[in-house]
Image: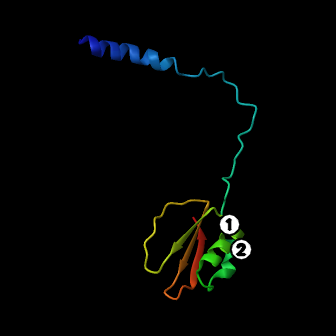
């Protein structure tokens, strides 16, 4: 057997074993705390703004009332990514700049 392969095969598991934390069999006393990210979006108060004109002022107002950190405008006939971000407000509008859809993500 080649010496290099011998050392890798025999010494690698020993090196990795040194990184392991021993299991004591006891559960942690502290419960896991679930933290929501800051800027969590809630689109329900914004639904009353459907039909309003899309503008910088309406965008600022929508950010304020939804608690979102970022605003994504979606012009007509535009493809958008499907990634979900809980701190983002997505606002779609039509050719007349009337808001047609408001959602988080």
To which residue does mark 2 refer?
Answer: 45
Give x and y (percent) for residue 95: 49, 87
Q: Residue 77: where, in percent of width, then height?
A: 43, 79
Q: Residue at x 45, y 17 (%)?
A: 15
Tell me the colour scheme of the image: rainbow
Residue for badge 1: 42
Which residue shows up at 62% across the image and 86% down it?
Answer: 51
Side of 82 relative to 53 (left or right) = left
Element assignment for label 2: helix
Please name the residue shown 46% across and 81% down the image. 76
Seen as rendered, the residue at the extreme left is 2
Position of residue 50 measured from the top left corner of the image (x, y, whole percent): 63, 82
Q: Is residue 57 left or right of residue 20?
A: right
At 52% from the left and 89% from the top, the residue drawn is: 96
Between marks 2 and 1, how big is the CA–CA gap? 7 Å
Residue 28 occupies which quadrant of the picture? top right
Few, some or many residues within 10 Å of mark 2 (<14, 14–19, 20+): few
Furthest residue in direction bottom, as rendered = 96
| Quadrant occupied by the C terminus | bottom right
Label 2–label 1 contact, CB within 8 A: yes
Looking at the rendered image, the quarter that the N terminus falls into is top left
Circle 1: element type: loop
Front residue of 23 and 63: 63
In the orientation shown, which residue stands out farthest toward the front?
A: 56
């Amino acid at each position: 057997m080649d010496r290099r392969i011998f050392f890798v095969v025999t010494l690698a598991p020993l090196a990795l074993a040194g990184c392991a934390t021993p299991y004591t069999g006891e559960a942690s006393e502290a419960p896991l705390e679930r933290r929501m990210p800051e800027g969590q979006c809630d689109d329900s108060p914004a639904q009353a703004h459907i039909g309003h004109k899309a503008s910088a002022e309406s965008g600022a107002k929508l950010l304020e009332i939804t608690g979102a950190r970022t605003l994504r405008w979606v012009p007509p006939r535009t493809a958008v990514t499907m990634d979900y971000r809980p701190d983002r407000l997505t606002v779609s509008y039509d050719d007349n700049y009337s808001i047609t859809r408001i959602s988080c993500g």
